[in-house]
Image: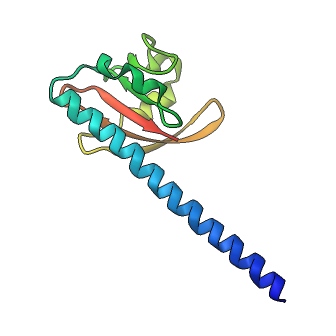
Amino acid sequence: MKRVAIISFVLIFGICLAAGAFAADKDAIKKQVDDIVVAIDGGKTAQDFTSAAQNKPYYVFIMEAGGMLLVHPSLVGQSLKEKAEPVYTECAKATAEGVWVKYVWKGNPKNTYVRTTKSGLIVGSGY
């Protein structure tokens, strides 16, 4: 009986740690996107954040409102609207305040925080 209690405690503790890490990841993703939006609104260009497309594990993408990707790990210069219209539709729900959207990319469920700049660019990152 004591062994079952210990195993149960370890499992519950592990779940609590995972939930805390998940919340921290969401906060880090949101901060990354918010910081880029503030910088672009302050005069930086999307191209100033090309290296953010390589951030692991939460890369950043920046696209025009019509879907043309300006910053992305592999799709720069391509239209997300043409490449993956359902993903584009979700990401296009971005607001100036920022919003979390859900979609499926290459068979995997994704959660992405997207936010618009004053000039209408969409900045996003997620898991």
In front of the other: 76 or 68: 76
> In this image, 7 relative to 81: left or right?
right
In front of the other: 72 or 51: 51
Which percent across, then down, holds residue 21?
52, 57
Which of the 4 image quadrants contains residue 4?
Answer: bottom right
Above/below status of 109 relative to 14: above
Which percent across, then down, holds residue 54?
48, 25
Which of the 4 image quadrants contains residue 1?
Answer: bottom right
Which percent across, then down, holds residue 100?
40, 46
In front of the other: 93 or 17: 17
> In this image, 24 relative to 64: left or right?
right
Residue that appears at 34% across and 23% down = 49
Give the total of numbered labels. Answer: 0
Above/below status of 12 relative to 89: below
Which percent across, then down, holds residue 104?
58, 36
Q: Residue furthest top?
A: 77
